[in-house]
Amino acid sequence: MLATAVVALIGLTTPLAMQATPARRATESSRRSDRRMFRALCTSCPDTTDFAVRGALQQGGGAPPRDLPAAHAEVHALRVQGNVWMLVGGGGGNITVQAGDDGVLLVDTSLASLSDVVMAEIKKISSKPVNYIINTHVHADHVGGNETFGKASTDFLAPTQVQIIAHESVLNRMSAPTGRQPAFPAGSWPTDTYFTKQKEVFFNSEAIILLHQPAAHTDGDTIVFFRRSDVVSTGDIFQTTTFPFIDTERGGTINGIIAALNNILDITVPRDKQEGGTYVIPGHGRLCDEHDVLEYRDMLTIVRDRVQDGVKKGMTLAQVKASQPTLDYDARWGSNAGPQTTDQFLEKIFDELQATRK
Amino acid sequence: MRNVERVRTASLVLLMLAVCGRPAFAQMDFSGVWAPLFHEDQPERIPGPDIGDYAGLPITEAARTRALAWDASLLTLPEHQCKPHPSTYGFRGVGNLRMWSDQDPATQQLIKINTHIQWQEQHRDIWMDGRPHPPEYAPHTWQGFSTGRWEGDTLVVSTTHLKAGWMRRNGLALTDRATMEDRFYRHGDLLTHVYIISDPVYLSEPLVKTNGFRLALNGRIDPYPCESVVEVPRAKGEVPNHLPGTNHAAEEFAAKHEIPVEAALGGAETALPEFIQKMKTLKVPAQTPAAARPAR
């Protein structure tokens, strides 16, 4: 009965997770559509409607994630292995929690409106304060809780400053020059950025490797490898719910996503018989291991190869769409509605491959 | 009045005993090593099915498209080399099957039934202690999460949380949304295993298969370690696949067996007797030298 209820709840929340992924094409019409969608969604938003959501919209940066009233949201904690847990549900992006004697480190903070629910789940894992936040990318369903969790602890016995780490592109997109409206409030901006291929952190007796993945889901993606716990947190480069959202507005590309998935496969090592070993926390969806990433990588590579073949033959976008290059995957990964339809997914791939052909 | 109460109470107790006590009397012991009997579907199970043979399987257009894109060279990639059969296929494979039970040492209650198939060490836990299936966000495995119950002497198993796997060794895939119910029947030294696979993506209706085993009193299970290696040097990220329209395996299979291509391409209709009449109206492709039957 309980399991049925949980499954039903997840079933209800999955479409919201899909909606929570920002999406758009670089056209004025889609911007207008986004604004209409935003207004429609906000009729059900709490009074403290996500500043980040508004900011992202004002920046012309994708459809807003649907921010549920926290009272209706449920977030579940799943122990992965070592020091790492996964928080999932509520319509936001997944959160990775690393906890130990030193304190708590979060990879992503989900939607702002989920912060209370998320905090309650974190408190079940550890009574220590949050010391670090690592953002995998800029989208509001992954950085929405930054402001709440980024506040310094005022505990008299253990005062802490929270470091928010991200690739510098994330800061550039969240902030704005003086006098202009930033996409996100200053309290949620990264406090420590990097622009190199990787950055290292040592926390809770564990080496944590941040690896920048250029031009993938966005231009500021980071995958986070917990070396001792043997867990990788991927952000939205990998998810188990839909085709990946290619945020072309923010520098995302299909070839970058495939390259990043190949990089994840380089890190992951199965325990035995292509199962277990390194666990992978996707941006949305269930807990995975290498084989799940492999299936996703194979699927995207095959779809990319088919579109590439059409481009090489001089086919038009309409002809490529008519050839149904995602037919075998649509029922599992596709979408006819929401922030990125399968048609839009194909258009982005076609545009990119067409552009690189010239 | 008091007698009525007593009769009512006694009836309730009897009813509860009848309901709760039934599984204890119905359990069948499947313990032992079982050798697979290959007379059923031998061509599929030993040499393996022809590439392009999807006949008689209730596959969807999506499954067919994916199978036609499948290139066996995919299995040369290191990440694909050590995959075991998923439980949706393993009982069709080669190698002995061992089954045994785990009981709670204090109560002797049945906790789980184990199945272990030799090839790639496919080990499966069938939980019999009433535990629920995990939530949707839990990881998926090759064998899935299985719970069992008794229907008379039949062990009925329900499996979820399967990895994306396959229904046949020639590119016919199953998604991670597939589920399975399987049934184990014992008749003396013979074991009949039936599995009923559902997949909302790649099957238009449940796929049912049966597998026979004979008890092997001298049976053994050897270890099956697997280490992946680079078999074919390739560019990073290369995924062997057939582009649309370039795979003629179904035509070759049809020509080889002198059946229409429509039959080779499968679908629920091709499993029905009525399809034999339809086949007579369809064109059989001519054999090409590549598809010609090998000389005997």
Image: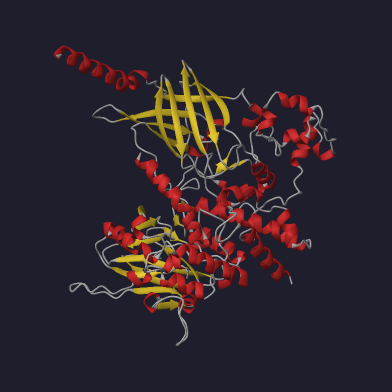
Quadrant containing the C terminus of chain B in the rendered view: top right
Q: Looking at the image, which residue sits at the far left?
A: B2
Residue shown at 40% from the left, 62% from the top: A227
Image location (x, y in percent) of residue A149: 33, 69
Q: In this orientation, which residue lies closer to the viewer: B234 or A42?
A: A42
Residue B252's x, y, as percent? 78, 38
Where is residue A174 drawn, in percent x and y?
A: 46, 76
Q: Quadrant of residue B288?
A: top right
Which residue is at 29% across, 59% downward? A120
Q: Quadrant of the N terminus of chain B?
A: top left
The image's colour scheme reads secondary structure
Q: Is residue B65 visible in this depiction of the protein?
A: yes
Depth check, front residue: B117 or A77:
A77
| Residue at the spot 42% in from the left edge and 19% down from the top edge | B153
Quarter-of-image position of residue B104: top left
Query: Taking A170 as reference, is B282 left or right?
Result: right
Residue A220 placement (x, y as % from top left): 51, 72
- How many numbered marks have been drawn onto this rendered protein structure? 0
Residue A196 position (above or below residue B1): below
**Which residue is the extreme one toward the top?**
B3
Given residues B126 and B292, the one toward you in this image is: B126
Image side of residue A146 versus residue A176, left or right: left
Q: Is residue A251 visible?
A: no
